[in-house]
Image (cartoon, rainbow, N blue to C red):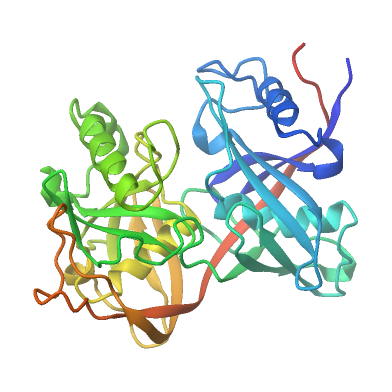
Amino acid sequence: MSGVRCMLMRGGTSKGAYFLGADLPADPAERDGLLLRLMGTPDPRQIDGLGGAHPLTSKVAVVWPGGGPDRDVDYLFLQVGVGEPTVSDRQTCGNLLAGVGQFAVERGLVAAGPERTSVRIRLVNTGATAVSSFPTPGGEVAYAGPAAISGVPGTAAPVELAFAGTEGSVCGSLLPTGRVRDTVEGIEVTCVDNGMPVVVAAAADLGLTGYEPVAELAAHADLARRVQALRTAAGRLMGLGEVAGTPVPKTTLVAPPREGGALCTRTFIPLRPHHSIGVLGAVSVATAALLDGAVGHDVLVRPPAGAPLEIEHPSGRLAVAVEFGDPEGPARPADPRTGGPGDPGGRGGPAVPRVRSSTVIRTARKLFDGTAFPRS
């Protein structure tokens, strides 16, 4: 049986298999078939593969040498289904991104600095760029360190992820519907894309507090149906087409913070309640909450000047810093089909600010490096 060189890594609150692009088939269909067999899909337990029986642990990062002078490596994220034989490239993953720079150094694509290394990464799924900075004392990647992130036991070396060009990375604009607020399936929502398309709704509008444990949300008989109806209708408004069988857009319910943070969240991927919140999902939700008139803006507790927003989730918090630039152009007027608010005279809403950059701190750890063998 022919094996494939593979590194298993935890990136943020996810876990995935990292491959060099040259080690996988060039044909996407052939590549995806191999990944399904490597990960053990389709099978709810993924018992015959590397997958961990959950979307957060059934992920793949494919990395190539950078294809241009402005980046060091290219990173393609693939979400591998668990019970269904699917491989999706319709989104990127900010959590697995936390391990891409280290993987590039380990595989010799990037030379390590004497103390710290910064790797410029192109996110192939979206076209955005990120800079990952992490310690490399003595020219070796350091995984041990003092940084703790919610949802991961213990501590590890901090990884700073700075994003640029993420607004509209999937949908084409920060506010894909042209409005800060729409009415979808009778619920007021904000549709936002600052690296991840997200439908933001108030938990109270779905009859929830927003503080429910994950198990309680998962056991809620009608909630998955309502989330699916909300995201599929919003997906069409966002220009994503039919999204019922895809992982985007994500849905995040927001509530006032109650643990000293800026905003409390409950996220679904796409229908299963998330134990935390994705990196770029948190960036998008934080960006929306900072916009006047958006869902969540009225309950946002702003931190002191210069401090990041602490986004609360079921496992703790995720700190996000968003820097805005000058506004660019007016939002489109309300669409009478959706009932979204807008200027009643049809002149358009307020100008939408540009996002200069977004920054988060994550950690990553190499778990295994060797050869993975697909089932025959």
Q: Is residue 266 above or below residue 35?
A: below
Give left or right: position of 272 versus 219: right
Quarter of the image with the N terminus in it: top right
Between residue 129 and residue 264, name the one nearer to us: 129
Residue 9, image x and y in percent? 69, 44
Q: Residue at x 32, y 67 (%)?
A: 288
Q: Is residue 183 above or below residue 40?
A: below
Q: Is residue 325 above or below residue 287?
A: below
| Quarter of the rendering containing residue 329 | bottom left
Q: Is residue 143 visible?
A: no
Give left or right: position of 247 versus 107: left
Residue 325, image x and y in percent? 44, 86
Q: Residue at x 28, y 35 (%)?
A: 228
Q: How many marks?
A: 0
Give left or right: position of 171 versus 375: left
Q: Residue at x 56, y 50 (%)?
A: 93
Residue 79, image x and y in percent? 57, 37
Quarter of the image with the C terminus in it: top right
Q: Residue at x 20, y 29 (%)?
A: 220
Q: Residue furthest top?
A: 376
Q: Is residue 361 visible?
A: yes
Residue 176, image x and y in percent? 36, 61
Give left or right: position of 274 versus 145: left
| Quarter of the rendering containing residue 345 | bottom left
